[in-house]
Image (tube, coloured by chain):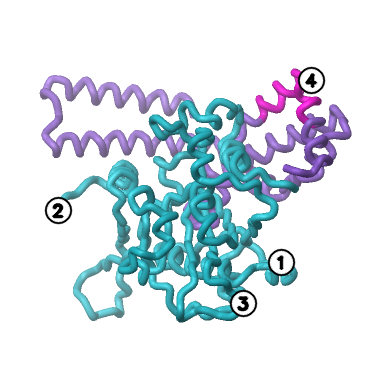
Amino acid sequence: MTSIREINRRLDLVDTFLYNSHLLADIIYHLRQTHDSQRLVQRFSLGRGDSDDLLSLARTIRETEKILARLKEVHHPSHDHVIARIVIPERLCERIEGAIDEEGLVRKQRLEELETAELGKVVRRVEGLEVEEERKPKRKDDLRKEDLWVMKKS
Amino acid sequence: MAGFPFFQLDRYLKILVEEHQKYVALCEEYRRPVEDTSSKLEFERRVVRIITPGTLIDERFMDPYENNFLLAVYTYDDQSMTQDMETDDVGLAWLDLSTGHFYTQKTDISSLPGDVARIAPREILLNEELQSDRSHALFTSIEEEKHFISYEPYTDLSLTSIPSSWNTLLEGPISPRLAKEFTLPEIRAGEVLLRSVKNRLLGTNMRLQPPIRKSKQDIMMIDANTLRALEIKRSMREGNIRGSLLSAIRRTVTKSGARLFADMICTINSL
């Protein structure tokens, strides 16, 4: 870095965060709710994204919106440069939220998890790792309980 | 011969690609069209992707805090030599499939070790003709033991400007003004890079961000030895991130932030 203007601009930015610990804490809190949007977007570019990724993306956009609002609230000249760079793809976010039923997705995922567990059991049995016969019924009970719990939740 | 259930794929990919540094070809089953009578089988299998350390997309074992770069190195050779190129010019092009970042840089043989150390690619593409020519100056900068190297055919590289075939792979077009700035070695390295990625992704369509030129003028150069001696990205003793400058001052909250920070710390740019 050789540009004095750029160095000063960055120092100013550090300054505002250093002396406004509430702002810092808020921004960190929002950032923690975000997902790795770069990799998420690229998954879609390569045709590998799923509905869960879409939701993560929408959530990340919403959090970015909150960060932007928070920065505007402070209204410090050193933030202008940062604020100008953030563009919120509002329409994309609305489309995602309008298209995906979050609760339905959670339910579907839970079912899939159960299926995978079931599959894992089959494999273990094939591999001859299944433990003594006595424990089998117990396991089935566990599974039934889980089923009931899923139904209650939904 | 061995087999494993499909949901264990990630685990075995990690072992094969990361630990044993193998190429893995992924096949999927496709239903044959009914009118196709060339075979009695109902399904056919096609290779859909070849997985190498440099072409990971979203595998769970990828390090989220670091970029997964694939680097193509283009050096002068007799066939593709033109007048506007010096013999020690080197073209670099690298990309991260998991984020879509795509960069190019023009450099020379003597600064190549520093460039390679800075980019820290997971895989390097070299001209297959070099495989038999151990005396090439390139091998003093790129030590084979330390990197995963793939030899690719560098044929038909007579192009002098960015070919239009790049546009189909990019998110947006390269502005004509910027396109002119790309130097010959960079374009050729980029072509090799895109060609081989395309060959490995076979069935998958890929989209990358338009290439960003890194020029030597705006990077404060840190050579390979300094980077290692100052333990900036890796500690000297164990060679991992613990104990390095990066791990000591990294306070980033997000994963993309961590990647940007790692990039900034060794390419201090003068905006």
- Residue B1 bears which disc, if any? 2
Residue B147, image x and y in percent?
38, 51
Q: Identify the residue position indicated by label 4 in the image.
A: A20
Residue B178 is tagged as 1
Chain that the image shows in purple: A
- Say whether marks 1 and 2 touch (CB < 8 Å): no
Mark 2 falls on what kind of element?
loop
Measure the C-alpha gap from mark 3 to mark 4: 55 Å
Give the extent of the magenta segment.
A13-30
Which disc is residue B83 wearing?
Answer: none
Q: Amino acid at mark 1?
A: Leu
Q: Is residue A131 magenta?
A: no
**Of B265 and A26, which appears nearest the observer?**
B265
Q: What residue type is disc 2 on?
A: Met
Nearer to us of marks 3 and 1 is 3
Q: CA distance from mark 1 to mark 4?
A: 41 Å
For residue A24: magenta?
A: yes
- Residue B210 is left or right of residue B123, and the answer is right
Q: Residues within 10 Å of mark 4 (few under 14, many from 20)?
A: few
- Report the chain holding disc 3: B
**Label 3 belongs to which residue?**
B84
With respect to residue A130, does A21 lie above or below? above
Q: Disc 2 vs disc 4: Cβ atoms closer than 8 Å? A: no
Q: Colour of chain B?
A: cyan
